[in-house]
Image: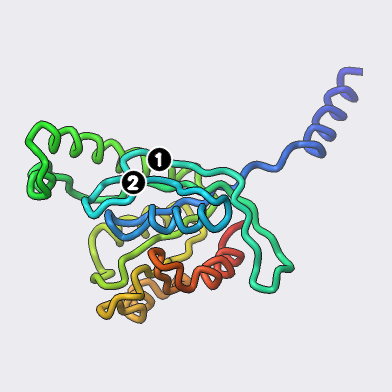
Amino acid sequence: MGFFTGFFNKFFGKLFLKKKDIKLGLYGPPNAGKTTLANTICKDILGEEMGTVSNIAHETREIQIKEQICIKSKDGKKELMFNLVDTPGIATKIDYEDFMKSGMKEAEAKQRAKEATKGVVDAIKWLDEMDSVVIVLDATKDPYSQVNITIVGNLAARDIPVLIAANKVDLKKADINKVKAAFPQYDVVGISAKYGKNIQDFYDALFKVIR
């Protein structure tokens, strides 16, 4: 009796088990445009923004989540549902004096640096929760940075599917080909998160990496 009860509980438990929510993480260096992209997606799908955007690095210092994001393919035949996770910018060094250069007083700058450091640690920890990741890079900057290589290395070690969003293609200095050359193992889509350029192409690319 106990055997059959255990068997049926296990079988039907799996049969009716709710599919886990897919988590899509936005990762990248500070000021690459992660939160801007998150806001564009959320406004497009949900009609509301994800978080605050600033020109000062590390504006996002805590993990932010928007649930039940549903995107459609260009032909409208496919849908993809996921929870969007916006993470603090990854940095290998955080110095409170850099915040003071932006006009903050010392006490505020030190607090910002402390929060930003915790944010980086939390972002790395959350990698273990991610099903897929979009690396958001500033296409006007050199992609061969220590921060970018650190992010890619952490993702490769976990075998997490990755899409690279080469952001800020609206700017003249943007060089998407340089980003592609730096990370040939991943699909790269050029976007302007600020102006919503190529966002549908970005959505279509997500269908290939989210699983």
Vertical arrangement, residue 64 with respect to residue 107, above or below: below
Dot 1 falls on a residue whose secondary structure is loop
- Residue 135 percent location from the top left of the image: 40, 60
Q: Is residue 191 rendered to the left or right of residue 59?
A: right
Q: Which residue lies furthest to the front in this view?
A: 47
Q: Are marks 1 and 2 in contact (CB under 8 Å)?
A: yes
**Disc with the residue nearer the chain's start (1 vs 2):** 1
Q: Residue, x 38% and y 71% (percent of image)?
A: 183
Q: Residue, x 26% and y 47% (percent of image)?
A: 58
Q: Which residue lies furthest to the top in this view?
A: 1
Report how far apart the C-alphas of labels 1 and 2 lie in the structure. Answer: 7 Å
To which quarter of the image does residue 1 belong?
Answer: top right
**Scheme of colours in the image:** rainbow
Q: In which quarter of the image is the C terminus?
A: bottom right
Q: Is residue 4 rendered to the left or right of residue 49?
A: right
Vertical arrangement, residue 75 with respect to residue 9, above or below: below
Q: Is residue 10 rendered to the left or right of residue 163?
A: right
Question: Disc 1 marks which amino acid?
Answer: Ile
- Residue 4 percent location from the top left of the image: 90, 25
Question: Disc 2 marks which amino acid?
Answer: Pro
Q: Residue, x 37% and y 43% (percent of image)?
A: 123
- Residue 42 percent location from the top left of the image: 51, 52
Which mark identifies residue 88?
2
Dot 2 falls on a residue whose secondary structure is loop
Give whichever of 174, 195 is nearer the camera.
195
Vertical arrangement, residue 57 with respect to residue 192, above or below: above
- Residue 159 percent location from the top left of the image: 49, 56
Q: Name the residue under label 1.
A: 63
